[in-house]
Amino acid sequence: MLDLDWSQCPEVEQVPGRRSGQPVVRGSRVTVAEVMDNYVNDSSLEEISENFGLPIERLQALLDYALRHAYVSHP
């Protein structure tokens, strides 16, 4: 998974005691890692939405944040 600072993403929260403090989709117990892992392993947003009970718009916001804040390091 991308090693991003999710603290500035409005769709994400970290709550001590919820999923060991991992970043989760706000108001849920679904970790950002679960969403991103499913996406990079070829699940569509529709499938992820259905599997985790999250609106596609919120999932798209997570992906948009990741794309805006990702960087590629070249040797």
Image (cartoon, rainbow, N blue to C red):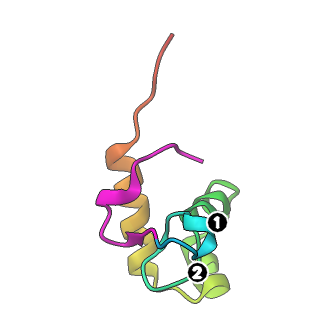
Q: Which residues are magenta?
A: 1-14
Q: Position of residue 56 (x, y in %)?
A: 46, 80
Image coordinates for residue 10, horizontal then vertical, percent = 30, 70
Q: Residue at x 62, y 87 (%)?
A: 50
Query: Which image quadrant for residue 33?
Result: bottom right
Residue type for callout 1 = Glu
Reply above or below: 4 against 14. above
User: Which mark, residue 34?
Assistant: 1
Percent across and percent down for residue 1 are 60, 48
Picture coordinates of residue 61 (x, y %)?
Answer: 36, 68
Q: Is residue 52 left or right of residue 24?
A: right
Q: Which residue is label 2 attached to?
A: 29
Is residue 24 rendered to the left or right of residue 51? Answer: left
**Dominant SS in magenta:** loop
**Secondary structure type for disc 2:** loop
Q: Nearer the viewer, mark 1 or mark 2?
A: 2
Which residue appears at 46% of the width and 22% of the height?
73
Residue at x 40%, y 41% (from the top left corner): 70
* 26 part of magenta stretch: no
The residue under label 2 is which amino acid type? Arg
Q: Residues within 10 Å of mark 2 (few under 14, many from 20)?
A: some
